[in-house]
Image: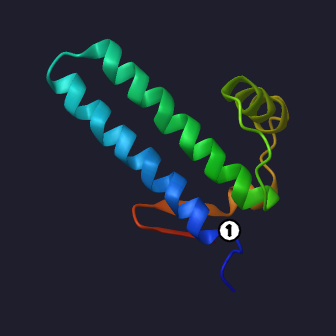
Amino acid sequence: MPHENKKEIDYYIERSINSLNCSKLLIDENYLLEAQNRLYYACFYIVKALFLFDRNKLIIKKHNNLLGLFNLEYIHNQQPRRKQRGMLVRKGDWSRI
């Protein structure tokens, strides 16, 4: 059964992959500060996808709030939840294993 937010999750995964690819190009051209910015957004977009996958909704819009909640729920917890252990992200495809 497809996830109810599949389109939105796919969108954020694709944005994350694009940001990561842009950062690689920028690093190759020695634009390190710009690459750092793209890497930040790659992380930001994938965290948004994770929350959509895990919670079925995303009500947080501000970067600091989203990243703070990620730290609280996923980092400080130190034990990945069963759903997170089962999420597999690949280019163009994501599924639960």
Q: Is residue 69 above or below residue 4?
A: above
Q: Report the residue that reaches farthest toward the left.
A: 29
Q: Position of residue 34 (x, y in %)?
A: 32, 19
Q: Is residue 60 left or right of residue 49?
A: right
Q: Position of residue 24 (x, y in %)?
A: 26, 33
The residue tagged with tag 1: helix, strand or loop? loop
Query: Which quadrant, please, contains the C terminus?
Result: bottom right
Model colouring = rainbow
Query: Which quadrant, please, contains the N terminus?
Result: bottom right
The residue sitting at 53% across, 36% down in the picture is 43
Residue 28: quadrant of the picture? top left
Residue 14: quadrant of the picture? bottom left
Residue 63: quadrant of the picture? top right
The residue sitting at 81% across, 42% down in the picture is 79
Quickly name the residue at label 1.
5
| 22 vs 83, nearest the viewer | 22
Amino acid type shown at disc 1: Asn
| 7 vs 49, nearest the viewer | 7
The residue sitting at 35% across, 46% down in the picture is 18
Q: Is residue 5 above or below residue 27?
A: below
Q: Is residue 94 above or below residue 54?
A: below
